[in-house]
Image: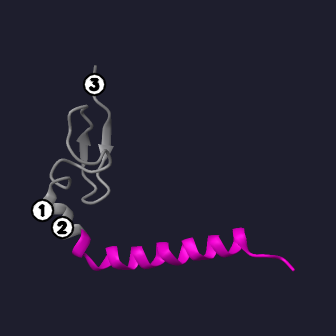
């Protein structure tokens, strides 16, 4: 049985998703290492993504839970 072929969300290279692969299922083995996680967290795009996600959460919270008076 062949393992499914996935594309890494970090480096966009294809890899086989094996059952005993450590790390995340959407990252290749080299991008799943602890050293790579530190580099990814320090990347400037990660900060802007966090800010954008926080803004999205606030907007959804306001839309869902505001009181219509």
Residue shown at the point (55%, 71%) measured from the top left: 57
For marks 3 and 1, give the CA distance: 29 Å
Residue shown at the point (79%, 76%) measured from the top left: 67
> Magenta stretch: residue 68 in it?
yes
Residue shown at the point (25%, 75%) measured from the top left: 43
Mark 1 secondary-structure assignment: helix
Total numbered labels placed on residues in the image: 3
Foreground disc of the pair 3, 1? 1
Foreground disc of the pair 3, 2? 2
Query: Farthest residue toward the left?
Result: 35
What's the magenta bit mostly, secondary-structure-wise?
Answer: helix
**Mark before the other along the chain sequence, 3 or 1:** 3
In the rendered view, tell whether residue 48 sits above or below residue 64. Answer: below
Horizontal relation, residue 66 to residue 47: left or right: right
Q: Are marks 1 and 2 in contact (CB under 8 Å)?
A: yes
Which label belongs to residue 35?
1
- In front of the other: 68 or 59: 68
What are the residue bounds of the magenta stretch?
A: 41-69
Q: Residue at label 3?
A: 2
Query: Farthest residue toward the right?
Result: 69
């Amino acid at each position: 049985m062949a393992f499914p072929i996935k594309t890494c969300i970090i480096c966009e290279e294809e890899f086989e998703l094996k059952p005993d692969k450590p790390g995340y299922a959407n990252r290749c083995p080299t991008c799943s290492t602890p050293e790579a996680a530190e580099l990814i967290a320090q990347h400037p795009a990660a900060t802007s993504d966090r800010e954008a996600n926080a803004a999205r959460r606030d907007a959804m919270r306001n839309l869902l839970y505001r009181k219509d008076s």
